[in-house]
């Protein structure tokens, strides 16, 4: 996934600063993981 460049703030001083664009790994869970995680929900 791509994250666009944006303006942020230093919380300590309040000064504006530029946050650079970044690429992040995306995660898409498969059916097996979804079923395993949601198994407890249907039983509860």
Image (cartoon, helix red, strand yellow):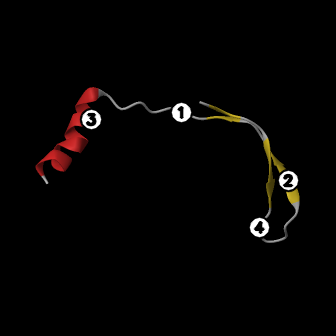
First in sequence: mark 2 vs mark 4: 4
Q: Which residue is mark 2?
A: 17
First in sequence: mark 1 vs mark 3: 1
Q: Quadrant of residue 6?
A: top right
Kindly report the distance in space between the C-alpha atoms of the residues bearing marks 1 and 2. Answer: 24 Å
Q: Are marks 2 and 4 in contact (CB under 8 Å)?
A: no
Q: Quadrant of residue 2?
A: top right
First in sequence: mark 2 vs mark 3: 2
Q: Residues within 10 Å of mark 3 (few under 14, many from 20)?
A: few
Q: Which residue is mark 1?
A: 25
Q: Which residue is mark 3?
A: 33
Q: Which residue is mark 4?
A: 11
Q: Is residue 13 left or right of residue 39?
A: right
Q: Nearer the viewer, residue 27 or 41?
A: 41
First in sequence: mark 3 vs mark 4: 4
Q: Are marks 1 and 3 in contact (CB under 8 Å)?
A: no
Q: For the residue labelled by badge 4, is the local secondary structure a helix, a strand or a loop?
A: loop
In front: label 4 or label 1: 4
């Amino acid at each position: 996934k791509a994250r666009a460049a944006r303006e942020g703030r230093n919380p300590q001083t309040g000064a504006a600063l530029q946050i650079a664009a970044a690429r992040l790994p995306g995660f898409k869970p498969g059916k097996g993981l979804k079923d395993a995680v949601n198994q407890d929900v249907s039983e509860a």
